[in-house]
Amino acid sequence: MRVVELAGLGPAPFAGMMLADMGADVIRVDRVTRHHEVAESTELSEVIERGRRSIAVNLKDPRGVAIVLDLVAGADALMEGYRPGVAERLGVGPAPCLARNPALVYGRMTGWGQDGPLAPTVGHDVTYIALTGVLDSIGPAGGGDPVLPLNLVGDFGGGGMLLAFGLVCGIVSARTTGRGQVVDAAMVDGAALLMAPYLARSEWGPRGTNMVDGGAHFYGVYATADDRHVAVGALEPQFYAVFLDRLGLADADLPAQMDQASWPAMRERVAAVFRGRTRDEWCDVFAGAETCFAPVLSRDEAAADPHLAARGTVVTRDGLRQPAPAPRFDRTPATLPPPRPRPGEHGDALLAELGIDEGEVAALRAGGVIG
């Protein structure tokens, strides 16, 4: 699979990382500035831009646009994360790309989508998850401020991962029908999709009062004596029984587990118990217990955790910590792809693949068309 990625920030590069991790030939078209310099990626891009080949092109020059269209002619997909209309103004929108390659899947990554009243306006992850009801659903009970789930829901889960899924689905269709199409991957759609278990639940109460949003005393996070935290998820009755036993509450006169009116008082009682020992002491108490318990680890601790280390979930290369490719395949396992390329690093090789000779490449570089 070959994917042309018009360089951008965040969600679209994350989709490119997922595809590159699985072995796709992702060609990133980096930008050349008006001073004929290559626009460097940020440090934040070191991980999510791994595994590509890079060519640096000035898309404001018709010769640069022609190079992108030549790449498109031999690709399965193109992906871009511009605001609606920008790709069209540059000359690399769906119409010219599909004219060159009718089987192309053209992936578009935006926050609001390609249409609708907000489509032309600016936004970020926080605004997309605010509008879709996600943000209001996460946070403490009693009217406290909503809690930001990093930018995982809008940018990456509801954005980049949705785009990667859409591109693969489009390519499967194109290989069956011979016809490509445009994939409109909007973060508002992806965030709403991730809310599927909750949007239609009429019995869902205010924030922080429900089973999996911190309302239940048997599903949540507790502070320990050393001001660290543990996480518990003893939903099933058999796990709940073990949970109470390890807390020393098995013989206490307690209300029924699903008596929702008792949850606030039970949460305070359980919180007081957890405050009696350190996080690591609670890990010893719950070691081997048939319940759902885990320490809340920092990023540094997670990288060294025995389970994650055994699976190689977090790897370090050249001092840079990053997640291993996922999911895992038993017949065709993925390996960590090469590091992020320098912008334009593979330009000469890619142009040679397009049949452009060395003299023309030199002229393109001298004219600022490529970097």
Image: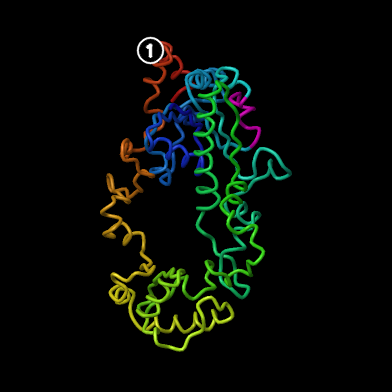
Image label count: 1
Instruction: Indicate left or right for 343 with 85 as reference.
Output: left
Residue 166 vertical position relative to residue 349 in the rendered view, above or below: below
Q: Residue at x 63, y 73 (%)?
A: 143
Measured as percent of width and height from the top left, residue 156 is found at 50, 47
**Location of the N terminus (image quadrant):** top left
Residue extending farthest to the bottom is 253
Q: In the current view of this chain or complex, which residue is farthest to the right?
A: 117
Above or below 122: residue 212: below
Front-most of residues 86 and 360: 86
Q: Residue 180: name its quadrant.
A: top right
**x and y percentages locating residue 63 in the rendered image:** 53, 17
Apparent side of residue 280 relative to residue 167 in the rendered image (left or right): left
Q: Nearer the viewer, residue 14 or 24?
A: 24
Image quarter of residue 114:
top right
Amino acid at pointer 1: Glu
**Magenta span contains residue 214:** no
Residue shown at 42% from the left, 15% from the top: 361
Q: Which residues are magenta?
A: 84-94
**Which residue position holds label 1?**
358
In the displayed structure image, the side of residue 135 where residue 299 appears, left or right: left
Q: Residues within 10 Å of mark 1 (few under 14, many from 20)?
A: few
Q: Is residue 92 magenta?
A: yes
Location of the C terminus (image quadrant): top left
Residue ID at (59%, 49%)? 193
- Up/down of 50 relative to 265, above or below: above
